[in-house]
Image: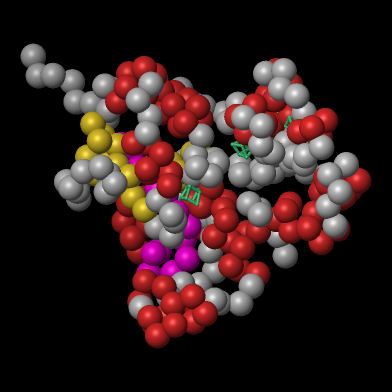
Amino acid sequence: MPATRKPTLAFFDFASCEGCQIEFTNFGDAATLELLSHVDIVEFREAMTETTDQRIDFALIEGSYTREEDRARLAEIRKRARVVIAYGACASTGGINALKNHQDDFADYVYGDDATMSHLRSGTARPISAAIEVDYEVLGCPMSKEELLNVISNLLHGTRYFAPTYPVCVQCKRRETICRYDEGDHCMGQVARAGCGAPCPADGVPCEACRGFVEDANLPALEKVLVERAGFSQKRAVGKSRMFTANLRS
Ligand code: SF4
Ligand code: SF4
Ligand code: SF4
């Protein structure tokens, strides 16, 4: 009897630091290794030289959609993939790349005469869902391992993963972490979308809402807390709250 074919998984990258792909190579825990035994990775630029032009079961797409020519490549991946997963904040929400949508182009300042290099030419940073249909988002900067494993293991079982819609504070409280505000710090876990398990406050650093915000996040209240409890200026409070949500803001 022929062996059952394992689902294939491929990574693709667009405008990004590729940190989400690199992060994957850091996972050596039992749950990830178990997951890897159930899939065949057929393309992963950070870790192997092989590529594929065949059909793929799971396409993990990292990075933002920033150039018109990206659209054709994204559409081609979409056509070949059974399931498309936006992998990390850049791909899911535009992430930190979207800050560029609200400021001048600093390419000349940073690169001088090399600023004309073709790969530096880019437009508005958007999530890949602006170009193609996306089936799942694995949020975070870098993406959350917990969420990635949940998405893939559900797919392997033929079920669907639903990300939490409540804020990071809920997961933080469950861990009994001392609140950053009680340590004289700031935090945006009140409005950040949970699903990561609140690792940042547990490690003694603020939640910067890298997974974006819950629906109907009360931003005036967040800014008020950042000003009144963390001593931020109003300008800094507004800037802080935009860090990972610039694509969604005017
Ligand atoms: S989400 Fe963050 S870590 Fe991942 S590619 Fe974008 S900037 Fe890099
Ligand atoms: S540390 Fe942050 S996430 Fe945790 S309870 Fe306080 S505000 Fe919420
Ligand atoms: S705690 Fe906040 S900053 Fe840290 S991974 Fe979760 S959403 Fe991102």
Ligand 2 location (quadrant): top right
Where residue 56 appears, as percent x and y from the top left, is 27, 41
- Nearest to the observer: residue 230 or residue 130: 230
Residue located farthest toward the left when viewing the structure as drawn: 1
In this rendering, the answer to whether 197 lies above or below 134 is: above
Residue located farthest toward the front when viewing the structure as drawn: 183
Q: Does the magenta stretch include residue 144?
A: no
Where residue 168 appears, as percent x and y from the top left, is 69, 31
Residue at image location 38% in from the left, 21% down from the top: 29
Residue at image location 77% in from the left, 28% down from the top: 179
Residue at image location 35% in from the left, 64% down from the top: 72
Q: Quadrant of the C terminus?
A: bottom right
Q: Does the magenta stretch include residue 64?
A: yes
Residue at image location 43% in from the left, 44% down from the top: 20
Q: Is residue 181 left or right of residue 246?
A: right
Which colouring convention does the figure follow?
secondary structure
Residue 195 shows up from this direction: no
Q: Quadrant of the N terminus?
A: top left
Where residue 177 appears, as percent x and y from the top left, is 71, 22
Q: Which residues are drawn in magenta? A: 57-71
Where residue 120 appears, as percent x and y from the top left, is 41, 73
